[in-house]
Amino acid sequence: MVFENLLVVTLFSIGGGIFLLERVPLFQRQRIKRNGRWTTNLGILVIGSIVLALCFPVGPYAVAEMQPHGFLSSMEIPLGGQFVLVFLLLDFWRYWEHRIFHKVSLLWRAHLVHHSDTVIDVTTAERHHPLEALITTPLALMLVFALGLPAEGVGIYLLAAIASSLWVHSNLRFPGVFDSALRILVVTPAVHLIHHSSTQQQTDSNYGSILTVWDRLFGTYIDPANVHIPYFGLEYFHKTRDTTLFRTLLQPVLYRKNMPSSVREIQPELPSIKTTALSYEWQQALLYGGMGLVLASLTMWPTFVSLVSLWSSSEPYQYAWLVLPFLIYALGWHYRDELLALSPQADPLGIAVTAGAIILWLIAAVVQINLGMYAAFVLVLQGILISVVGRHIWWQLFPLFALLFFMIPSGDVLQLPLRILTVMAIDWFANITNLPHSIDGFVIYIGANRYVVIEACSGLTFVMLAMFLAYSWGTLLYHSMSKVISLALLGGLLGIAANVLRVNMIIWLDWINGTQMSLAEHGDMQLIALIFLLGALFLTVYRLQPEVKTVKGHCSDKIQLSGQSMKGYVPVVSGLLVACTIGLAQLIMSISEAESPSSSVELAFVSADNFSTAQSNINWVVDEKSKTSTLNLVLDSELEVMIVQALPGNKKLSESGLIPRGNHDWREANIASRLACWQENCINFMHTTWNRSGSDDVQHIFYAYHVGNYITDSKLIYRVATGWNRLTGANQKAGLISFFFAGKPPALEKLVDAYMQIQTAHRQNNWDKWLIESRDI
């Protein structure tokens, strides 16, 4: 996962840097007309990435890492020599793979999409049809698997290949002497541009990926000094309508061998296009705004790293990697001229918004709610943006700036409603198709088959991806926030429809075949549902008519400050405010964590199966990996208590133990809040019911949080209480006590009695007395 993140960072950092350089007329090889091709190329990148992730969850590096060393290691070649051989071998493979894709008609259908781009820039590098990726990826995996190539060598080549691809497709002008010297060994933009010529002879040349040696060796090299490129693209698929995303995805199907040439409508050379230069106001705004963003980003870097880690590890939020690149594209390219026609005005309101975000971050940090810290990070960005452009321009562009809120992983609030909706959809489908069925919470019985609607079945991934894509495309089509939101909501509905299609296809196929698919086999249905979702989204957007791009200025509403020199410093003040407050708070919290006692947060589990006689000794076991210390107390045949205590610096309560033993076999069937009373004590327990896959085994788990004498079933209230506990310096015991029962649970009144006795022993740290009295529980 770390290397995959590095690949993504390499792609977006190098690609983003080249993109910015391509916007500078001085560096451009040619002027490019904005005709929607960027939307098409980025759309193909998104679709291809999603399809590839679903079909091949591991890449060549992961395969190499899992495999034992192959023939290179057995030859006792030094590690550096192995890396060189792997690099040459993979580049040689890429050369012939590329060449074969040009020569075999069936493969050319998939590859021609890359060549049909009539303008070559950094986005062309990732313009590969999903079909091509579905062919090349398994071939690469088999090569790495068969040869047992070292993972480090594979990783080095993959990183170099990505960087090279972005560079050779860039719309940048390089000095002739520089290019001539480099192309003796490596592929340069001038070399690769010949490969994208509309002339067939030039297209079938210069196949090399990184090195030019293969083209020179096998006679396919054409020197840029001896050739003239009439146009980029192909002799077909160069009309205006061929640039749309939907039409481009259909090109492998529309292609016919020996297709006749058509009249060229798109002219790549457009030297007369006017571009708006950066005004002095924008130069100052970008300078001071950049300083403010750097200060805030460096200070909140731990929050951002935590946010990015969640994107990588949680499937429903992996789309968030596209938020910043899309926003940069929309502001720096799609609306560039309209935006630069305005006059940014530094606005002190941004300082106030930043201050509010800081307060939110401090509160979230105290109560340890990461979601609040992520929201504060995005609000800090919004505050600095207001400081840079002013409230009126910010409000006009708010539909675009609101994209930043998609970075916040807040979709979990939809998880439970979507699970309930999925159960209702299955019930509806079973009634229509007259399937015998019954429902118990999240457990559905269809004939002899039992299905449990777990979180992975809720369709949150589909909903979040569809809403983001629809909202993003909406910002390119409309200025009205209501229209953009409406399109995003429509995307969410399509996501729900795709998930309903997926789960009901699974049930219907199981019913027809008289079997029940494994979870691994559900992936095929997920791919079909994804294709349906993307197709429905593209068809919807394809039929919408965009509004005329206009951004109105508010010259009369300029913010006047006391001095001209002070005006530009507003975003810097915002950044300094973040650095001074959040930076200081992080320092104080780190010192506090180092000095805090290890008993600040504790976790207790109580189970009711597989117990022996009571024990009298108490031994804490420290686990450095999870940063916890564990105490196990075994009582006669009815009760076991396990207390997991967080070590210093790891105050956050882990709930990973709230799953029955053998958690890979259990599925959560129901969750509800249960009120139980005994004598004068009443407790709200959270009750989860679990079913074991492939059997009728059932387990019940009851749990509640406590801070001192206060007991709650709400994680949020617990977090607030523990945060206040730390803020006020109170040393109250805090944690969670849970009861595990196999089969039918006992009366809830007994759970209240047991909970109160355990909590008292926990609070007073008097386990010896409780061990003696526990037989009465």
Image (cartoon, rainbow, N blue to C red):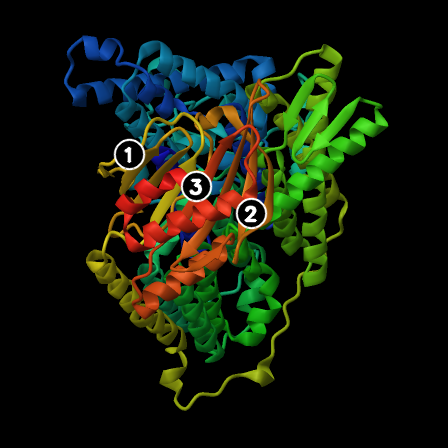
Q: x, y (%) of residue 355?
A: 42, 74
731, 572: nearer the viewer: 731
Displayed quadrant of residue 26: bottom left
Q: Which mark is residue 182?
A: 1
Identify which amino acid the numbered label 1 is placed on: Leu
Q: Earlier in the sequence, mark 1 or mark 2?
A: 1
Instruction: Residue at 33% x, 70% y: name it.
Output: 728
343, 731: nearer the viewer: 731
Identify which amino acid the numbered label 2 is placed on: Asp
Q: Which mark is residue 412?
A: 2
Q: Which residue is mark 3?
A: 777
The answer to whether any part of residue 262 appears in the image is no
Q: Quadrant of the C terminus?
A: top left
The secondary element bearing badge 2 is classed as helix
The secondary element bearing badge 1 is classed as helix
Q: How many C-alpha atoms fall within 10 Å of the one at disc 2: few (<14), some, or many (≥20)?
A: few
Q: How many C-alpha atoms fall within 10 Å of the one at disc 1: few (<14), some, or many (≥20)?
A: few
The residue mark sitting in front, 1 or 3, is 3
Identify which amino acid the numbered label 3 is placed on: Ile
The answer to whether any part of residue 598 appears in the image is yes
Q: Earlier in the sequence, mark 3 or mark 2?
A: 2
Q: Does residue 594 appear left or right of residue 646 in this picture? A: left
The residue mark sitting in front, 3 or 2, is 3
- How far apart are the alpha carbons under marks 1 and 2? 51 Å
Q: How many C-alpha atoms fall within 10 Å of the one at disc 3: few (<14), some, or many (≥20)?
A: some
Q: Does residue 164 appear left or right of residue 672 in this picture? A: left
444, 227: nearer the viewer: 444
